[in-house]
Amino acid sequence: MAWLVFFLMTALTASLGALLLDQSASTTTNMLQSSESLKEQLRQQDEKLHTAQTKLHEISQQLTQMEEAASKPAAISEQIQTQLKEDREKQAQLQKEAARLIKWKEKNNAEKLRIQTEQSQIDAAKRQLEIDEKLVDLDILTAIVESRVQKKIQASAQSVNAANPKPAPEPAGPLKGADQFGEAPYVPAAAAPVTVQVAHNDSKAGSEVLARKNALTEEKKKWLAKQQQLNSDKKKLAQSQALYEKQQLAYVQAVKSSQLTTP
């Protein structure tokens, strides 16, 4: 009986052990299957994540390229606007410089015309002064000659008068011949003293000639001063013209460098 009980207990224990082993094996198998399934799911998720990351990276690159492509026209447009602004400023400066040079040239031309006109006036005045001086010199020479001639004539007249003195009147006598009939007796005429009309205005004429000479000298000094001032103006004009030509050349070079047309 005890043996039977022991046998039954052993059999029951073995049965329970086998059952437990089967359940444990089944559980282990299930766990292994679950683990493999989980690993597969994780692997698939990793693949999906990698694929998503790859696509995200591609999208990010595309966005970057799109942003760069979008920013390039803006940058180019900004550069173009900046260049156009600089060109407009340069053109305005060149136009302003051109206007200044034109006014400068007109001023130089006007000054040149004024100098030429005044030079013509001075030259004409010089020629007239030369003529007047020659006339005055001729008048002076004529006055000197006339004065000498008059002095010689006067001296000659005085010599003649000294050689032919005036005779004294004869005393009255008795009437003779024709004198009885009331006629005066014939008396030969005595030689009359030689007289010379000497001009009394020699001194006055000489003073007038000298006054004219002095006036011409003062006039000559006045025109000489004008000529000196005009020579100074000519020098200033030459300096101004040289500086103008230098700046004009610089302007032309600036126009060429900016590819603009000279106005």
Image (cartoon, rainbow, N blue to C red):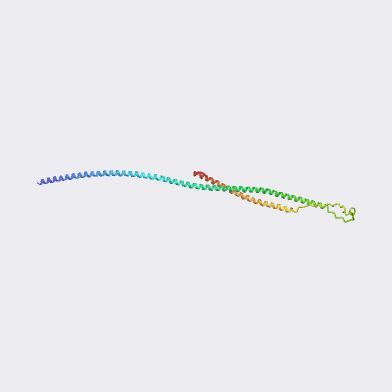
Location of residue 34 in the rendering, given as x and y in whole percent from the top left corner: 23, 44
Total tally of numbered discs in the picture: 0
Which residue reaches farthest front?
A: 181
> Horizontal and vertical percent for residue 44?
28, 43
- In depth, the one of 127 and 221 nearer the eye is 127
Residue furthest toward the bottom? Answer: 172
| 106 on left or right of 56 | right
Left or right: 90 as drawn, with respect to 169: left
Q: Nearer the viewer, residue 41 or 88?
A: 88
Residue 36 found in image quarter: top left
What percent of the width, then of the height, locates residue 22?
18, 44
Q: Name the spot of residue 51 as percent of width and height, x first.
A: 31, 43
Q: Compare residues 192 and 224 and report the one nearer the observer.
A: 192
